[in-house]
Image: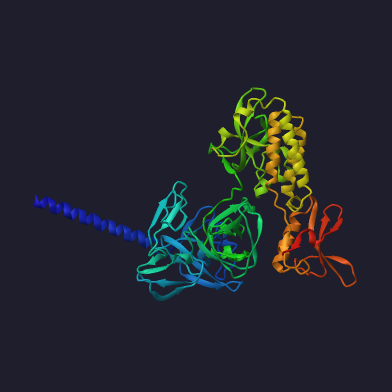
Amino acid sequence: MKKKGMIIAFAFLGLLILTACSQTENADKKKNTIKVASMTSITDKKGNGLEKYRGKSARLFFDEKAKTVKYYGIRYVKTPRNNIKAYYNIGHGGYVPADSAILIDGKPAIALNSNSYVYNSKLKRTGKKYKVYQPLIYAGKVKYSNKESKKDKWSYYSGNTKKPYAIPKVYKKKYLKIGKNRYIKAVNVFSIRREKLTVKGPITATVKKNMYSFDSRLYETNHLYKKGQKVKLDKCISAGNGDNTLFYYRIAKTHEYLFWGGTDYWDETYEASTFFDDSKLKVKQHMDASDFLPGKTEYAVAKDRKAKKLQTYDMTGTAIKGKKILNLFVHVDGQAYLLNPQTKKIELFYHLQDQHLIGEFFWFETQADDEDFKATDQYNGFLKANEVKKAKLPTIISKKAAKTSDQPASASQLAALKTEIAKAEAVQKKTIYKLSSSYRRDYLDYALSNAQKALSGNKGEVTFAKWLLANSETYLNGKKAPVTNINKLSKAEYERVRRIVSDAAPNGYMTTIYYKRADGTWHRKYSYSWNNKNCKFVYVNEKTNEKKFLKISDFAKNSK
């Protein structure tokens, strides 16, 4: 019996030794290797792009798939912007940027967003300090989840759609492990595995230039935040899509937002994210952005994940020929039960929000671009509710009302619509309409025209026309900019007035600045610098070149 036990013990010990040897062998294989991101260009030792590398195109060597290669040291190069950039030597005269590494020696690569001290387990500085351009290895554990818990402060994208959150283990609430008894502050980390490390927040940011805040509908307010001011932020939102996406941060525990910037938010490297750093708000480490949903709107998402198009429908619930939307994520702002006059069938539909109002554009299968939109596509389009995921929206036409929606409108309905028409016509003469952007004015103009036509329509058409008219008015946001002295605009005041002048430009006109020469003649100014004494805003007709010289008092007013 003892003999048998000894045999089992020796066998188990042998298995442990084999496992340890296997692990050591794997570790040795990964030593001095980097996994390089796809589409990485190979350079020479000075950081200049190569045409060929080992007989292949240097730009296509790391094509659509990340590759693991050996490296033979790191070289630091001074860039034309007087920054230092690190490159891995991959042999044969080739180098790759250090921030293109996903794994270093088989372990997750860390990229910094600032210089960072190293701390020991007692949180005492070791004397070592890493520069922002130096690559590091993350040596801690990672857990994966389909959602963040209340305790998790930092996370990055895992690459797995089922468990998208990769959550690094944080030491003493704010440190990440980079080696045995070595830690750095998590706030100094830009990315892990080349995925941006986002923080749950709230975060503190610094205002770099004077800027006005925006309200919950992203309309500019009169609240000025000054250069150098520290602000606490608790939410990040994105408005628009593709290259038109803009990012805003919410002032903590308020309904005010500050504009951060555009698509630099998505950049995969710290260098790229700061290359065109024209943001007025300095954010060291970003929060994860959620979608901006203005008012009572929601995203409509196709139920069928394999679907490539979404069919649109008209007021009768009939499919609009050739008008399938190629976007599968679009905003909807109301629900209506529509009666098909042919089949007498009543079904639930979601009304498509005018995408121009939120900086998003959906594409139709038969149209080249959004400039070809027709009014019926923009404002009268619907999606069938059973073809998209369920949404909770304001009701335009109830199921009960839909049963008689094809009958002639009553006198009281027509009277109510006429009242709304009169209100809208009065609004067109006010500043709130005149100084709104062209898309907002177009929406009300169409809704008004549609309402006038609906006076001879049925109950359903009158009900929808009244709702559309009221809805269009909620998007108007024109107002004069309050300034200290209308005859002496500060730089921040000038920039705000210029935005209002540009937004309010009539269709077919571009906004320019003209200055007056000593001989009394006016000439176009090709910079945006402003001189209060001899500059004027001018609308120029893009076809006829006709010029309209504008008064500042039409766009700004002295604050009391």
Q: How many marks?
A: 0
Q: Quadrant of the C terminus?
A: bottom right
The reply to whether residue 512 is in sight is: no
Which residue of the protein is positioned furthest toward the top in this rendering? 343
Question: Which of the two residues, 81 or 141, is positioned nearer the viewer here?
Answer: 141
Q: Position of residue 55 (x, y in %)?
A: 55, 60
The quadrant where residue 321 appears? top right
- The residue positioned 60% from the left and 44% from the top of the image is 296
The reply to whether residue 387 is in sight is: yes
In this picture, is 125 found above or below 323? below
Q: Position of residue 137 (x, y in %)?
A: 42, 64
In this picture, is 151 found above or below 385? below
In this picture, residue 419 sits left or right of residue 21: right
Q: Position of residue 455 (x, y in %)?
A: 76, 32
- The residue positioned 50% from the left and 65% from the top of the image is 98
In this picture, is 313 found above or below 268? above
Which residue of the protein is positioned furthest toward the right in this rendering? 519
In this picture, residue 365 sits left or right of residue 66: right
Q: How is the image coloured?
A: rainbow
Q: Position of residue 45 (x, y in %)?
A: 55, 70
Question: Which of the two residues, 504 or 103, is positioned nearer the viewer here?
Answer: 504
Which residue of the protein is positioned furthest toward the bottom in this rendering? 127
